[in-house]
Image (cartoon, rainbow, N blue to C red):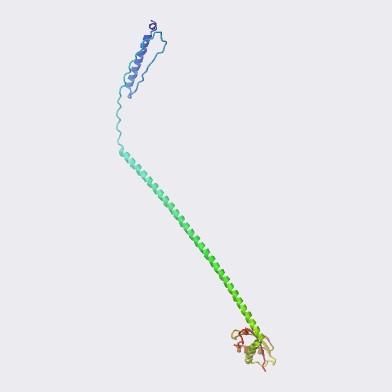
Amino acid sequence: MIGDSKNLIPVTMAVALHVVVFGSMIIAFDYARPTPFTPLAVQATLVQEIPAVVPPPVVEPEPEPEPVVEEPEPEPEPDNSEELRRQAEEEKRRLDALLEQQRLDELRKQEEADKKQRERDEAERKKREEEDKERKRIEAERKRQEDIKRQREENERLRRELEAEQRQAEIDAEAERLEAVDAGQQSVYVAMISQKIQRNLSLPASAPDDLLCTVRVRQARGGEVLGVTFLGCNGDDAVKRSVEAAIFKSSPLPDPPQDNLFDPNLKVPITKQQ
């Protein structure tokens, strides 16, 4: 036969034997390992020219079931619960201390911020008080200056009115006096004063018969003599002393017939009576 002449059957049997041996070696090696190993099934196919006559199929052996390897029970872990509890408590204390420190820091910062805010508020309050005091002081000073100005203006107005009234009174008095002088009453007043002085006059022997001394008598209200000034005199010093003594001896001088005739600086003539 063509197949036998080419040795196909022996070759196929040899390949199958090699496959079985190779699989047994893998299984044996897997048993020797401490951990389970799943062997891979190897299937080989010989590819060559197929003769006209197909050979019978090769029946591969069933793979043996994998052995069940029991895993060893894990060793019991040591009991470190007390250490873990201690570490947990220590960590909790550390966290509590950290939180407390943070709380104290926040509290301190808040207290410092509150203190600074109170200081700013106090400084602002004092500033407002100082500004208010300064504003009141300026306002009071302004009012005082206005009052002084008003008082000065009022005083000036009153002074002007008083001066105007006094001037008017003086004008009126002078007008009345001039009217009285024109009427001859001023001459009567001067004659009254001159006669009183003449009665008190004691002339020295050196006095000339035509003696004429004109004096200005300064008097106060009521006729009190305040001073004597000679405007002219043809007598010597002894005569002048006699005339001056007679004038002071006549104080107080007679009152004028009318009050408006009073003259504080009255001019009086003095002569030698025969």
Q: Quadrant of the C terminus?
A: bottom right
Is residue 135 visible in the rendered structure shown here?
A: yes
Q: Residue at x 62, y 78 (%)?
A: 168
Position of residue 126 measured from the top left corner of the image (x, y, whole percent): 47, 59
Residue 205, picture quadrant: bottom right
Counting labels gives 0
Residue 75, picture quadrant: top left
Position of residue 39 measured from the top left corner of the image (x, y, whole percent): 35, 21
Residue 95, picture quadrant: top left
Q: Quadrant of the N terminus?
A: top left
In the image, 25 versus 54, the foreground residue is 54
In the image, 147 versus 169, the foreground residue is 169
Task: Specify whether 17 is left or right of 241.
Answer: left
Q: Residue at x 36, y 15 (%)?
A: 19
Residue, far top: 1
In the image, 147 versus 249, the foreground residue is 147
Position of residue 130 measured from the top left corner of the image (x, y, whole percent): 49, 60
Q: Residue at x 45, y 54 (%)?
A: 117
Q: Residue at x 33, y 19 (%)?
A: 27
Task: Specify whether 78 is left or right of 217.
Answer: left
Residue 161 lies, with reference to residue 17, above or below; the image says below
Is residue 229 visible in the rendered structure shown here?
A: no
Residue 63 lies, with reference to residue 145, above or below; the image says above
Residue, far bottom: 274
Task: Specify whether 24 is left or right of 162.
Answer: left
In the image, 266 versus 150, the foreground residue is 150
Position of residue 255 measured from the top left corner of the image (x, y, whole percent): 60, 87
